[in-house]
Each structure stands twice: as structure tokens, then as C-alpha cells.
Image (cartoon, rainbow, N blue to C red):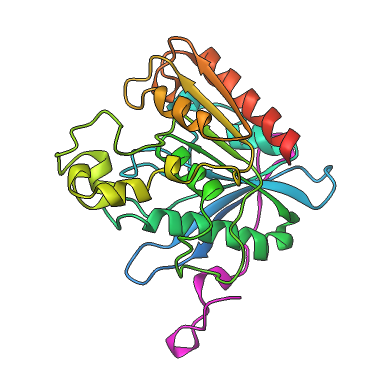
Amino acid sequence: MTAPPRPGGLMPPHAGPLPEARSGAGGVRVVGSVRYAGVPGFRPLEMDLYLPPEGFGRPVPAVVFLHGGGWLVGSRNAAGPAFAGASPTPFERVALAGIAVASIDYRLSGEATWPAALHDAKAAVRWLRTRGPEAGLDPTRIAAWGESAGGHLAALLGLTSDFEGGVGITGVSSAVKTVVCWYAPSDLATVPTDPDAPDSREALFLGAPVSAVPERAAEASPITYAGEHAPPFLLLHGTADRLVPAQQSRRLADALPNVELELFEDADHMWLGTPEVAETALNRTIDFLRHHL
């Protein structure tokens, strides 16, 4: 179930005690810097847990949030620039609706290439399934939600049954019940970047230019795995997205059996310049998660 003790009897990072909770907006309890896994030679892999107020019954469902940033930058601290300074934060709003949020960090492309980030995301789900009950979470009701590159990883969480890796707790299912993707790439070979460029976001993530590793690009693309086995998906995208065209979500939606696709006219990547769309997207996400969890 868990990794063996480290040399010298040191406790593996995922086995440590939960930090003390602090108070968030509306009575949300925030447990910060929870180490869900560790990889020798890398920074600790951590998540922040946003738990519903005490008034909710236990156990509660949970959603893993994966941040964007082109697999190159970003952190677990925010759900995108459209929500900068918001109080309550998007994570607190989800928790106030009765769903815990586990916002995670994962290895970025400057630290490790594909499939390391997916290994980390799956390790986070396995940690929630194994140790989440200590925080009042239901191990049978776990979802995935991500924006941009994080949405790509969330989709892969919902669609793949392999790529488990050996990070953190092992031998436990990393399956999720439902997936929400905001403006996410679904086919790395057709994102409009130079396929021969060694420094594109996709090339840095894959470890080589897309044109040089077409099999790896397909292996890392959610569209490759879409099929009847997929859980329910919610895909939200702006039609004026300049980084990840809305066609990426359209194509994935066409390949999924149980999907809700909503396109927002004239909305750009990260909902920039359209705060009303950002608000709508968050409300749609909360409603969808509540329905399926």
C-alpha cells in the first residue's frame, strides 16, 4: 500500500502527520503544505486541502485541482489570474459548497518531463484515497479539475488507467469519478506552436520537439484515450483563446460519451478580460461537481 521506509528508518513524506488547519473564509478549514509524495532529488510534492466548514456531514467528496502554466510555471496557490485577490477564493467557494479541494503542486517541465507530472497527479489521488479519511474525506468520491496545462492533466486522470509511476502511496486506484477542464489542450500535436521548436511549452513538457517524438505526443494527449470508459466531463473554453484554440475542447467533446461542452463567445485564455465569464465558469464547475459527487 505504501512505499517502504527510507534508508535509516526515515518516514516517507506521504506518511507524515497532517499539519494543523487554519481558518479560511466562511469557516473553511485550510490544511496547508501537506506532503503527499516525495521524489529523491526534487522539491517535496505538496498539496493544500480546503475542507468544508464543520456544519457539513462527514465524509465529504473531494476534487483535485491542477494549476496551469504550460507545464513550465505555476503553483497550487491560485486558480488563475482572473481570480487574483478574490475572497473567498475559488477553492474556498468550492469547499463552502460541500466539496473539499486538494490543490496540488506537480513536477514542472524544468524538473522532469512526461509522464512525471501525471505520475504526481495520480499519486495525489492515491493519497486522498488512502489518507483522506483522516481529514473527513470520502475515498469513493474524488474528482479532477484543472485549468490549461492542469486541465490537460485532469483529463488524463479521467481517461488513463496506467501511468501510475512509483511516486508516493502505491497499490491504490487513482481513478476519478468526474473531470472538469478549463481551456485545456487535448491533442499536443495540433496545438498551434512550431512542432520543430525545441523550446515550445509542448517540447519542454515532452522532452523533445513535437515533430521529433510524435508517438510520445500522442501518448501524452487526452484525445488518444477518449472512449466509452470515460467518466462525465465538463469542458469550458473561450472562442477567442489565443493560446489553446477552442477546437481542442470541441474535438475532445466529440470523442467522449458523457460530456458537457460550453464555449464562451469572445473569451480568451484564462478568462482574461472577461470577469463575468470567470464567474460563470466557476459557478458551472461547482454545480457540475455537486451533481456528480
Name the quadrant of the C terminus. top right
| Membership of 239 in magenta stretch | no
The percent position of residue 202, horizontal first and vertical second, equals 27, 42
Name the quadrant of the N terminus. bottom right
Front one among 22 and 37: 37
Is residue 280 among what the camera can see?
yes
Q: Left or right: where does residue 29 sit relative to residue 14?
A: right
Residue depicted at x 50% and y 70%: 13
Q: Give the range drawn in magenta.
A: 1-29
Q: Residue furthest bottom?
A: 8
The percent position of residue 122, horizontal first and vertical second, equals 52, 57
Q: Left or right: where does residue 150 sit relative to residue 91?
A: left
Residue 103, placed above or below residue 91: below
Residue depicted at x 42% and y 63%: 44
The percent position of residue 204, horizontal first and vertical second, equals 24, 47
The percent position of residue 118, horizontal first and vertical second, equals 44, 54
Quadrant of the image occupied by residue 114: bottom left
Is residue 103 among what the camera can see?
no
| Membership of 6 in magenta stretch | yes
Front one among 199 and 270: 199
Residue depicted at x 33% and y 42%: 73
